[in-house]
Image (cartoon, rainbow, N blue to C red):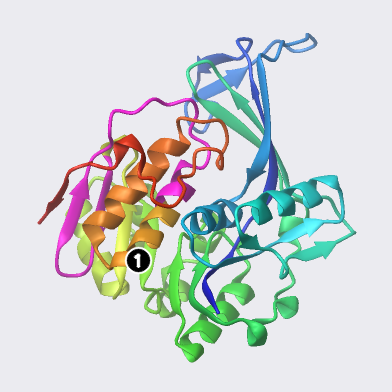
Amino acid sequence: MYDIVSIGSSTRDVLLKSEGYEVIKGSIFSTRQGQCFPLGSKVEIKKIVFTGGGGGANAAVTFGRQGLKTACIGAVGQDFNGKELLELLERDGVDTKYFQKHNDDLTAYSVILVTDEGERTILSYKGEGQHFDVAKIPFDELETKWLYLDSLGGHFELLEKAVTWATTKGVKLATTPGGKELAHGLEKLRPFLKQFAIVVMNQEEAAGLSGIPYEKEAEIFKFMDEVIPGIFVMTKGPEGVVVSDGTHRYRAGVPDSPIVERTGAGDAFSSGFITEYMRSGDISKAIQFATANASSVVAEYGGMAGILRKDDWGPWSLVEVSVE
């Protein structure tokens, strides 16, 4: 019997830090800023870090390091990077026996270009991650108390089967849906969202799904409380987080912690919240541990190095939580 099973993306990551990346502003970029370097020249790399990544794998490492009996399900290639990724997970106590190993493509790979200021651009190759075969996930063999669904690459059949299986078996559900899941739209997702005990989104995603303007936070929560009977967690970037259990809203800011780079911060927050809520059922403590986990992750390179271990809440766990 597992405490939790994580399903989602799993990647091999390399982080490259350089003083040669120039950040420029321009309307041609979706974020209004671009990370640039001279074409046709060599750019010196000051630091290189190889690690694992992907939302499903990052979350599984949090669960594993916190002492939960954990399995992770993803897809990798039968290559060196796939082997390394599985070994990274296993070192943190994550069972990888349900991973799908394919030989028709390479393991998903991300090249993360990090500036001196900690900003980054991610060059993402989806590889085997986009070849998840739902028919090969042995749901009938799984015994778990919780099931966590990260981004599934928009694989609606997988979402449908996972939620149906969990609700039939009495398994509690938590999710941080990816952009491709949210792109299915509210009406298609509504029957599934009502089955989740915990749903985590950022404010932009919640506004897009609800159709309510970004700045109208109260209206977004009123709407989402009707759609999600469980706990709705809305992250607000540098403004912190607001959580609703349908009766009260819990609000916390972001601690003043050092930032090396932000890869994996969202995964660390989501999985940290779920971990502590599983343990204590206390939303305020869950917010505090989630914040501590995310703050520790951004103080290291990559999405896994800073993930906290059992009984370690780091120096950022005393964030104040207000209840409305």
The stretch drawn in magenta includes residue 264 = yes
Identify which amino acid the numbered label 1 is placed on: Arg
Whether residue 45 sits left or right of residue 29 in the image: it is right
Up-down relation of residue 309 to residue 5 (above or below): above
Asked whether the viewer can see residue 208, the reply is no
Q: Quadrant of residue 283?
A: bottom left
Q: Quadrant of the C terminus?
A: bottom left
Q: Residue at point 73% right, 68% down?
A: 97
Question: Residue at coordinates 70% horizontally, 81% vertically from top-left?
Answer: 138
- The magenta region covers 240-269
Query: In the rendered image, which residue does mark 1 sit on?
Result: 279
Residue at coordinates 50% horizontally, 38% vertically from top-left? 306
222 over 309 or under it: above or below: below
Name, please, the residue furthest toward the left: 324
Residue 178 picture location, percent across and down: 52, 56
Residue 58 in view, yes or no: yes
Q: Quadrant of residue 162?
A: bottom right
The percent position of residue 134, horizontal first and vertical second, equals 70, 75
- Element on which disc 1 rests: helix
Mark 1 Cα-neighbour bin, 10 Å: few <14, some 14–19, many ≥20: few
Outermost residue, bottom side: 168
Residue under the image location 71 percent in, 70 percent down:
98
Q: Position of residue 268 (x, y in %)?
A: 45, 48
Q: Quadrant of the N terminus?
A: bottom right
Q: Residue furthest front?
A: 311
Instruction: Say if the magenta span includes residue 14.
Output: no
Report the side of 210 relative to 17 (left or right): left
